[in-house]
Image (cartoon, rainbow, N blue to C red):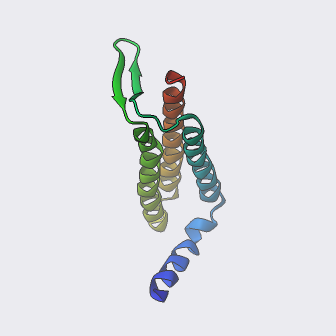
């Protein structure tokens, strides 16, 4: 257990996490993802009947599902953040800082897109 904790501490003590650009991007990414979770928790209540999960301008409602399925969006955001974080860390270690920054900016754009998608689900169900 202590070996694992030591490896985790060593990972977060790396030069990568001392970069101000990476640090601020991570803060914004986590704030957007947390906002996504909170908005869904506030506005989507547990109900017995299906809710609208996707609306298309051309075809109308094209996906219904359980209220629990809306939490797939912020969970997907966290998964993609983890993937981008490790790829960014890898490129940072290889001294390819620009690629590392682009990956983290892409992670922020993904979070913002998922926030818009969640807001659309909230609006369409009210």
> Residue 118: x and y, percent?
50, 34
Q: Quadrant of residue 65?
A: top left
Kindly identify the residue that appears in the image at 52 percent across and 58 percent down. 97
42 above or below 4?
above
> Residue 82: x and y, percent?
44, 57
Q: Quadrant of residue 27?
A: bottom right
> Residue 37: x and y, percent?
55, 45
Q: Quick one: 45 or 64, which is closer to the camera?
A: 45
> Residue 42: x and y, percent?
60, 39
Q: Is residue 102 left or right of residue 23?
A: left
Kindly identify the residue that appears in the image at 63 percent across and 67 percent down. 18
Name the quarter where the N terminus is drawn. bottom left
Q: Quick one: 97 or 58, which is closer to the camera?
A: 58
Name the quarter where the C terminus is drawn. top right
Kindly identify the residue that appears in the image at 46 percent across and 34 percent down. 47
Q: Quick one: 13 or 55, which is closer to the camera?
A: 55
């Amino acid at each position: 257990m202590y070996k694992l904790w030591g490896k985790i501490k060593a990972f977060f003590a790396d030069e990568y996490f001392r970069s101000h650009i990476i640090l601020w991007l991570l803060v914004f990414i986590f704030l957007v993802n947390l906002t996504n979770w909170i908005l869904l928790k506030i506005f989507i209540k547990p109900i017995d009947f299906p809710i609208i999960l996707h609306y298309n301008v051309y075809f109308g409602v094209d996906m219904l599902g359980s209220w629990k399925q809306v939490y797939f969006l912020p969970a997907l955001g966290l998964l993609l953040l983890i993937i981008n974080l490790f790829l960014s860390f890898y490129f940072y270690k290889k001294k390819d800082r620009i690629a590392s920054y682009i990956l983290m900016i892409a992670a922020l754009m993904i979070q913002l897109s998922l926030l818009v998608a969640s807001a659309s689900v909230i609006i369409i169900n009210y």
